[in-house]
Image (cartoon, rainbow, N blue to C red):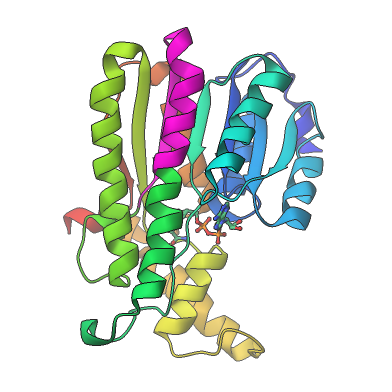
Amino acid sequence: SRLLSASPGSGRLAGKVAIITGAASGIGKATAAEFVKNGAKVIIADLQDDLGHAVAAELGGPDMAFYARCDVTNEAQVAAAVDLAVARHGHLDVMFNNAGIIGGTYMGGPIESMDMADFDRVMAVNLRGVATGIKHAARAMVPRSQGCILCTASTAGVLGGSAPHAYSVSKTAVVGMVRSAAAELAARGVRVNAISPYGIATSMGTRAVREMLGLPLVGAGAGDEEAVRRVFEEDFNEMGGGVVLRAEDVARAAVFLASDDARYITGHNLMVDGGFSVG
Ligand code: NAD
């Protein structure tokens, strides 16, 4: 495949070992591809086994990309993914805490009817999952005084009202967790940064837009697909001057932050949003 044409040992991430959570799909999958292309070895951590195995195979198989089932709400599984990376490759250089869920329904209805079980679920994946990833990555990275931890936040974490409350606040908290962990880990050689994308037509993004448009989540016709496509390609591209944001744009930002070019950048929240959050 095109990806295999990059010779191992060359590239901006040559020699680096990375774990990417939520890498069976969307932004995580695109980042896994971009990391492998740039010379990294990647552990694809997710709970969608079939998709995860398929992504690993597509990226060149076990030496380049290895699938490990890892539910980020389960600390033992996160710890095991870190241990697996170290056992397979000797060290861990990059931990990308990217897995996330939007939860409930698009806006979740009025706050008076907020579903607190859904709130807990979203926080467990989006915030506690990230904190758990930071904890176990630090365990592997601090003894070597090097490493890079990345966490996917969102424009929804800096703007009110653009997603359900639980989702937005979980992402605000991810940025807070990144700043807090970065402050501790700066002097211990480990960088911690967030990346905040705007709307992308991944499975989560598409689901959110379907709900926003009042479309059913399953069994939709082609006309509905067209309406969803229009939102991403014609409404959302107001940002970025007509450019449609792709998962690959986030992946390339992650390559930069994970590379030695970003060696002095920590505690930052890199907006990949075409100006949405400053508008
Ligand atoms: P996606 O649904 O395509 O991918 C999310 C992946 O995370 C899936 O493969 C899913 O199986 C995995 N996942 C969910 N819960 C998990 C768990 N408990 N343990 C392990 N893996 C789990 O969506 P995406 O858009 O690629 O989302 C990736 C990240 O980007 C999320 O954190 C999301 O909040 C964030 N984000 C997305 C957008 C967007 O518009 N798509 C915008 C801003 C931020």
Residue 12 as seen in the image, left or right of residue 58: left
* Residue 186 seen by the camera: yes
Residue 36 as seen in the image, left or right of residue 114: right
Residue for point 69% across, 18% down: 89
Q: Quadrant of the C terminus?
A: bottom left
Q: Position of residue 106 (x, y in %)?
A: 39, 78
Q: Is residue 168 magenta?
A: no
Residue for point 32% across, 67% down: 166
* Residue 265 vertical placement versus 75 (above, below): above
Residue 208 as seen in the image, left or right of residue 12: left
| Corner quadrant of residue 3 | top right
Q: Position of residue 121 (x, y in %)?
A: 44, 65
Q: Nearer the viewer, residue 61 or 201?
A: 61
* Residue 84 vertical placement versus 230 (above, below): above
Magenta residues span: 131-153
> Mainly helix, strand or loop, the magenta region?
helix
- Name the outermost residue toward the top: 144
Q: Quadrant of the N terminus?
A: top right
| Corner quadrant of residue 103 | bottom left
Residue for point 70% across, 20% down: 87
Q: Position of residue 275 (x, y in %)?
A: 25, 53
* Residue 40 seen by the camera: no
Q: Is residue 145 magenta?
A: yes
Q: Nearer the viewer, residue 150 or 78?
A: 78
| Corner quadrant of residue 113 | bottom left
* Residue 17 vertical placement versus 208 (above, below): above
Residue for point 52% across, 72% down: 206
Q: Nearer the viewer, residue 94 or 38?
A: 94
Q: Position of residue 85 (x, y in %)?
A: 65, 26
